Image: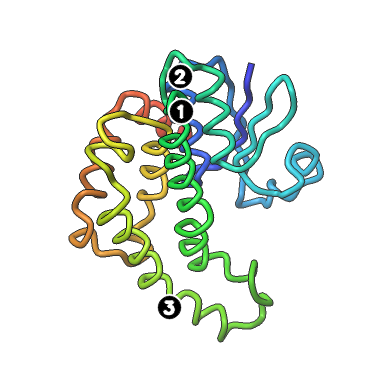
Amino acid sequence: MLTLYYAPHTCALATHIVLEEVGADYSTVRIDFATDEQRSPAYLKINPKGRVPALVTDRGVLTETPAMLVFAAQSFPKAKLAPFDDPFVFAEAQAFNSYLCSTLHVAHAHRMRGPRWVDAGDAHSIAAMQRKVPESVTACYELIERGMLKGPWVMGERYTICDAYLFTLAQWLEADGVDPGHIPRVIDHRRRMSERVTVRKAITQELA
């Protein structure tokens, strides 16, 4: 049994979707950001980073979305959600997910997580970071639009873990000030993802 610790409207949704896609036996635990539950002693014992998601397995706890997505795909190979048969293509998938994690998500986080980088009382610096978000996040999506989406799915004709991750982050692009008209392929990908039964189920469970 796997246990996914999540909060609604976070990148935990990507792992949640993939657990549904592979047919895993799993349960979920909701972490309440409104009460800072992610910083509670009980949760910090599970994930000392104080963030979601965290995935409890019978071998220990995993954190960081790219790692969790690969773990799920490798644990359920019949689902064929990662191109393990081709080392180069798999590395490309890893590169895409790493970009989402280390660049796009970080650019997005500057809108509401400024105190991660500057003192909470430095209103000028926080405001400057927030003003930059539409430009920096738009640049990320334009790069994905032009050069990283290989077909109807991120990796081309094959649906993979990359698609769940891109869809999850794309939920926030309008709030980040991105004009959807500039990235029609990303928007079409988001629409098609939203129609998948597994995606709808994961979202419904998180918002219940």
The foreground one among 34 and 156 is 156
Residue occupied by mark 2: 22
Residue depth check, mark 2 versus mark 3: number of the one nearer the observer: 2
Q: Are marks 1 and 2 in contact (CB under 8 Å)?
A: yes
Residue 125 image offset from top left, x and y in percent = 57, 82
- In the rendered image, residue 18, in percent from the top left (x then y), is placed at 46, 28
Q: Which residue is mark 1?
A: 18
Disc 1 versus disc 3: distance between alpha carbons? 33 Å
Q: Position of residue 82 (x, y in %)?
A: 44, 28
In what element is the residue under mark 1?
helix
Disc with the residue nearer the chain's start (2 vs 3): 2
Distance from disc 1 to disc 2, alpha carbons, whole Å, reads 6 Å
The quadrant of the picture occupied by the N terminus is: top right
What amino acid type is highlighted by mark number 1?
Val
Q: Secondary structure at mark 3?
A: helix
Q: Quadrant of residue 175?
A: bottom left
Total numbered labels placed on residues in the image? 3
| Mark carried by residue 131 | 3
Q: Nearer the viewer, residue 23 or 81?
A: 81
Residue 35 vs residue 183, the one in the foreground: 183
Can you name the residue that lies furthest to the bottom here?
Answer: 124
Q: Quadrant of residue 193?
A: top left
Say which residue appears at 64% left-offset and 37% top-offset.
Answer: 54
Report, in whole angstroms, how far the alpha carbon at label 2 lies from the one at label 3. Answer: 40 Å
Q: Which mark is residue 4?
A: none
Mark 2 Cα-neighbour bin, 10 Å: few <14, some 14–19, many ≥20: some
Q: Are marks 2 and 3 in contact (CB under 8 Å)?
A: no
